[in-house]
Amino acid sequence: MNLKFCSLASGSSGNCYYVGNDKQGILIDAGIGVKTIKKRLKAIDVSLESILGIFVTHDHYDHISSVGVLGEVYNIPIYSTQEILDGINKCYKVTDKLYHSKHPIEKGNATTIGDFLVESFPVSHDSTDCVGYSISYKKTLFTIATDLGYINSEAAVHIVNSTSFVIESNYDEEILLQGPYPLFLKERILSKKGHLSNHEMARFLSENYQEHWKNIFLCHLSKENNTPEAAIQAVKTKLEENNIEVNLHCQLMALPRTSPTCLFEL
């Protein structure tokens, strides 16, 4: 059985990712409705009952909107740092607060859940706290790093060592600067506590490209400040500067914002 991945949604209107095998799996974030999660899981032949836990990256609403219901009503364990769990319960939009379903974890420590080993690592974002996750299963290491103002050393190590990974590609800097957003919001997005641009993401991939990479999934693309074509082209341009042909050994894909992907074998 190989490790499998499906993006159920990826963007500012909601984020949720499935990682699992033929028997069981986990969710990373739950920022879309429960009915939508169940429907999209069913489309890939996954039942909600097979979900062993939900690992939350941070406490912004587009990542946590259904966490309370899934934890307290459906009894799915919710894993994250204590700061993030506290932040979820302080979010006024989350009406179902976390009680028995809370499972605090420490950044840098690994959690065994079913067949998977899940390790969290710190990333830089303007939330109460923010982490990425690496999931180990057999010979596959899969990393999710979303909502990060820059790629710190911890995130870099996890991404470089992964066989497949999800990395943020939030905005095209030119589109953002010329767009209608107010100055304070542009400055927030551009900051080291904001989001990762196409250029910075592509530069990192170009400078750290590994032949063992199999899949690169670009996530959390802005509706207003990016396009899938711009994000993909940014990567290809940077890699071509180093004479790297990405699709020769590695699949490159921009994840859709509001619709699910197919189920990928990693």
Image (tube, helix red, strand yellow):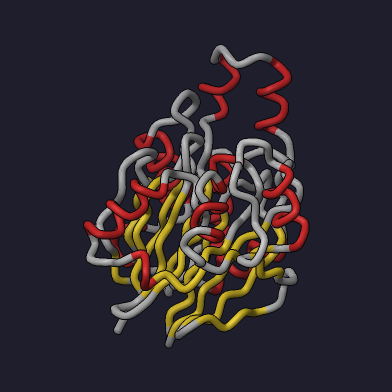
**178 to 260, vertically: above or below:** above
**240 to 121, vertically: above or below:** above
The quadrant of the rendering that contains the N terminus is bottom left
Residue beneath the point at 43% across and 39% down = 231
Residue beneath the point at 73% across and 41% down = 126
Residue beneath the point at 77% across and 56% down = 83
122 displayed left or right of 135: right
| Image x and y of residue 235, in percent | 44, 46
Residue beneath the point at 34% across and 46% down = 36
Q: Based on the displayed image, in which of its 4 quarters is residue 18 positioned?
A: bottom left
Nearest the viewer among 81 and 130 is 81
Looking at the image, can residue 211 be seen?
A: no
155 displayed left or right of 227: right
| Image x and y of residue 111, in percent | 62, 79
The quadrant of the rendering that contains the C terminus is bottom left
Q: Give the total number of marks visible in the rendering.
A: 0
Nearest the viewer among 67 and 264 is 67
| Image x and y of residue 132, in percent | 61, 60
120 displayed left or right of 43: right
Looking at the image, can residue 228 be seen?
A: yes
